[in-house]
């Protein structure tokens, strides 16, 4: 494999991992979300699930304030009509955060 192929291979693998994490998040939501799925703000029931967000990745961004304590990966469920956001813990939902980490559940 040529050196210039590595970034594209890494990007494809990363995209596959993120798609799998979103799929797992959606499955978990389908199992756990009972009752009304209506948005508490606009009453619509159309939602989208984000890829996982890791606070330690955000901390590496410029203009970021880092406060001590544990770091949790989350996924967000966003109303597609008004933008209302539910934030859920990915570890609790059993979604592996690290591609080499097959452990699931709360940490």
Image (spheres, rainbow, N blue to C red):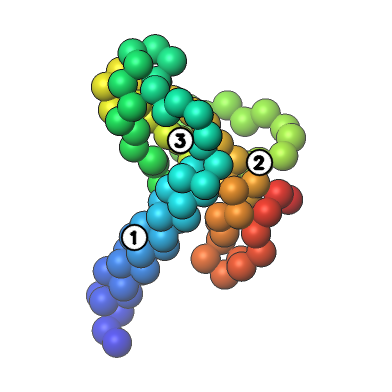
Sequence-wise, which precedes: disc 3 or disc 1? 1
Residue at x 46%, y 45% (from the top left corner): 30
| Secondary element at tag 1 | helix
Residue at x 52%, y 47% (from the top left corner): 31
Residue marked by disc 3: 76
Between residue 41 and residue 96, name the one nearer to us: 41
Residue 77 appears in view: yes
Q: Quadrant of the N terminus?
A: bottom left
Looking at the image, the residue that sits furthest to the bottom is: 1
Q: Where residue 75 appears, x then y in whole percent?
A: 49, 41
Q: Where residue 86 appears, x then y in whole percent?
A: 49, 28
Residue at x 41%, y 55% (from the top left corner): 23
Q: What is the number of the mark on residue 68?
A: none
Q: How many marks?
A: 3
Q: CA distance from mark 2 to mark 3?
A: 16 Å
Q: CA distance from mark 1 to mark 2?
A: 22 Å
Between residue 98 and residue 65, name the one nearer to us: 98
| Secondary element at tag 3 | strand
Residue marked by disc 2: 71
């Amino acid at each position: 494999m040529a050196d210039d192929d590595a970034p594209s291979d890494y990007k494809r693998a990363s995209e596959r991992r993120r798609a799998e994490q979103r799929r797992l998040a959606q499955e978990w939501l389908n199992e756990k979300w009972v009752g009304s799925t209506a948005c508490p703000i606009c009453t619509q029931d159309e939602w989208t699930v984000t890829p996982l967000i890791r606070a330690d990745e955000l901390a590496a961004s410029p203009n970021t304030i880092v406060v001590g304590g544990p770091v949790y990966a989350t996924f967000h469920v966003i109303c597609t009509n008004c933008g209302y956001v539910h934030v859920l813990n990915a570890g609790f939902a059993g979604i592996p955060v690290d591609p080499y980490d097959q452990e699931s559940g709360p940490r």
